[in-house]
Image (spheres, helix red, strand yellow):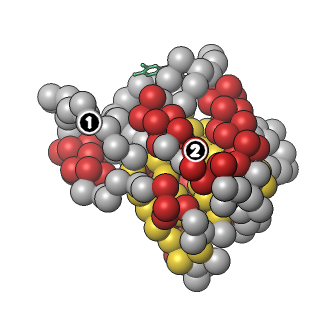
Amino acid sequence: MKVIIVFHSVCGNTYLMAKFFEAVFIKAGHQVTLRRVADVDWVAKPDLSLEAVRILAEMRELPEAVPAELLGADVILMGSPVYFGNVSAELKAFMDSTGGLWFQGKLIGKKFGAFVSAGHAEGGADLTLQALHTYAQYMGMLSVPVPVTLLPGENINSLGIIQYSRGKHAERLDERTGRLIEHWSRIF
Ligand SMILES: Cc1cc2nc3c(=O)[nH]c(=O)nc-3n(C[C@H](O)[C@H](O)[C@H](O)COP(=O)(O)O)c2cc1C
């Protein structure tokens, strides 16, 4: 299976999710392309830990996504930070740049999965996942749900994977998010 992961991230949390998806799909024998979207005014904040700086530098080295790369994929995963209950402007700009593919029906039938990093559980993550699925619906893609039973003893959001950063810069992916990604990736 060919998988493309397109994400936006400023503080690295969504990036660590995307990177873990990449590792899990590669381990399962799939061909994976990992791309960040363009972010022209991104700047590294001062006073970060060495690990946060390393992660952000690694993220910035990734190539930027171009719409044509979506054509060869069987599975498209999109990830965004939660900004006021919506996808970031940078990811939205990429989504909008795929309008030509929409007119031509080029993404119809591809599987689609969504993931987000949010500050807190108070609000916004659900709405952001929903925005991603609205995009997928317009494109004619097949949204892959997250089974509520994905992790034993927990109720899991059906719309995608949510990671809570508490507004901190990324230093490592939390263990629960990793388990969610591992389990969910087997369903595609
Ligand atoms: C402009 C802006 C708006 C935000 N809006 C929300 C929000 O509505 N809900 C929320 O939980 N977190 C919100 N956050 C926090 C981010 O979603 C959170 O820090 C996230 O982990 C950032 O992802 P990143 O590390 O990949 O950049 C907002 C942050 C910014 C900068």
Pair 2/1: label in front: 2
Q: Amino acid at mark 2?
A: Gly
Q: Which mark is residue 99?
A: 2
> Image quadrant for the N terminus?
bottom right
Left or right: 96 as drawn, with respect to 179:
left
Residue for point 50% across, 23% down: 83
Q: Which disc, if any, is residue 15?
A: none
Question: Does residue 48 lie above or below 146 as drawn?
Answer: above
Q: Position of residue 132 (x, y in %)?
A: 65, 39
In screen coordinates, is 139 left or right of 11?
A: right
Which of the pair 10/75 is nearer the observer? Answer: 75
Residue 26 drawn at (x, y percent): 52, 75
Q: Mark 1 — residue?
A: 40
Residue lying at the far left of the rendered structure = 46
**Residue 175, how many percent across, how many down?**
54, 51
Query: Do we see residue 110 in this rendering?
Result: yes
Label 2 environment density (alpha carbons within 10 Å; few <14, some 14–19, many ≥20) = few
